Image (spheres, rainbow, N blue to C red):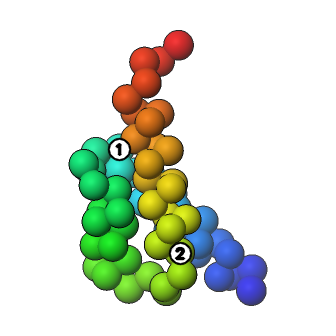
Amino acid sequence: MANAKRSHNEVQESLRELTRIFRPKDPRKFVKDYIRKYRITGGYEDELTVLVERELVKLNSPAS
């Protein structure tokens, strides 16, 4: 189980990096494409979409 958790963390970190690079206009579509491309197990879509949305908010807010 620990291995699955680690890979989930790797998925999140990878998705954060891709979000910073691509700055997607549609986070849900971006996540769907990511899940399809990398064959991620289903069930994470909503969680990963929220992660992308949060990352975009961070990128768009001025650094303080």
Q: Residues within 10 Å of mark 1 (few under 14, many from 20)?
A: some
Image coordinates of residue 36 in percent, x first then y, are: 31, 81
Locate the N terminus by quadrant. bottom right
Give the tally of numbered discs.
2
Residue at 53 percent of width and 13 percent of height:
64
Callout 2 amino acid: Tyr
In the image, taking residue 59 as reference, residue 22 lies left or right, namely left
Relative depth, front residue between 47 and 64: 47
Name the residue tied to disc 2.
Answer: 44
- Badge 2 or badge 1: first in the primary sequence: 1
Counting from the top left corner in percent of width and height, residue 26 is at: 27, 55
Residue 20: assigned label: 1
What's the distance in space between the residues labelled 2 and 1, CA to CA? 20 Å
Contact? badges 2 and 1 (CB < 8 Å): no
Q: Position of residue 22 (x, y in %)?
A: 25, 49
Of labels 2 and 1, the one closer to you:
2
Give the farthest residue toward the right: 2
